[in-house]
Amino acid sequence: MADTFYLLVINPGSTSTKAGIYKNNELLFEKTVRHQKQELSSFGRIVDQKEFRLQVIENQLNQNGFRLEDMDAYVGRGGIVAPLESGVYNINKRMIFDLVNTKAGEHASALGGILAFELGEKYGKPSYVVDPVVVDEILPEARLSGLPEISRRCVWHALNQKAVARRCAKDLGKTYNNCSLIVAHMGGGISVGAHLNGRTVDVNDGLGGEGPFSPERTGGLPAESLIRLCYSGKYTLSELVDFVIKNGGMSAYIGTNDLRVCEERIENGDEQAKLVLTAMAYQVSKEIGAMFVALRGKADAIALTGGLANSKLFTGIIKEYVGSLAPVMIYPGEDELGALAQGALRVLRGEEEAKEYAPR
């Protein structure tokens, strides 16, 4: 078995294409290309951007002395497919069909799996996704919503949460499979998960309107008031969905989704900005408290990660609320490229077996 592997890792965003080249765990090259909205507006659906995004990646690699065909495997961030267990998955045609035809809402991460599969097929190399956003390991009692017609679903920051949980466990001198952790990923969306012995037994739907409000999303809303708003005649269906997933939260209150701008306003005496930041931290803290129930009141640590974890003000408020429950450990930002590479590397080294995507 080879002991050196070259990996192309692809992590598309709604307005960016991020790619990296790894030699085993060593990052050789990383580039994020930002796209103007007008560049992407000609594409009807996100999946229609496939050729455009692939050309962007190939151009960047060529300019920096790398070739697509020299890779040993291609790894993409997984999009919205059928719920599945955590792990590394071979990308197969059924997965591609579900990525292209999902009825659960388009997400730019779908392009990661689609592009990795295209390259794997072209060059005869394996292609993988790692811990897609729909990893579902929640307890049966956590699945009931209170209405039989609606089951709770999991759309969350599985990739970064799982990677941070492994890192946190290591820092505690433990393994992820022998640990009780609460991980809060705090970025444009916020998801808080209860990790028990290697499984995420409960987590809020970070996309569909559960949990804390975030810089861009509403989180959970009072149901009756939301129903009345839906029938008010003021908004279309798409406008209401946009409120929940991209035009709500902090941005709806103070007109910005940038926490740094919010903090600048606070420094200049803006009381509304202060209230909104405090409320968002309070709601994250409440969700962390809720996840203690899923762990039966015992956690080895609370890990805060994502872009908002760079803010000492924001994390400081959370620590004031939950610091007495368990040690609070902070891992700012995210390393999704690294998490994708490490997952694929575990498979290529024979440390883990890739799973097959075969939903019922």
Image (spheres, rainbow, N blue to C red):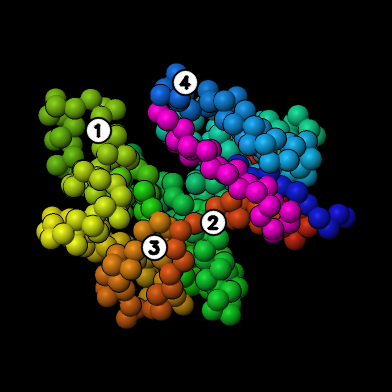
- Secondary structure beneath dot 1 equals helix
Q: Left or right: 3 with respect to 12?
A: right
> Given the image, on which type of amino acid does mark 3 rest?
Asn
Q: Are marks 2 and 1 in contact (CB under 8 Å)?
A: no
The residues colored magenta run 11-37
Residue 198: where, in percent of width, then height?
A: 56, 65
- Secondary structure beneath dot 4 equals loop
Tell me what residue is drawn at x 29 percent, y 65 percent: 314
Mark in the foreground, 4 or 1: 4
Instruction: Choose the circle earlier in sequence order: 2 or 1.
Output: 1
Decide if residue 142 is in sight here.
no
Residue 140: where, in percent of width, then height?
A: 44, 56
Residue at mark 3: 310
At label 1, counting other C-alpha atoms closer than 10 Å, the crowd grade (few under 14, some 14-19, many 20 or more) is some
Residue at mark 2: 335
Tell me the quarter of the image containing the C terminus: top right
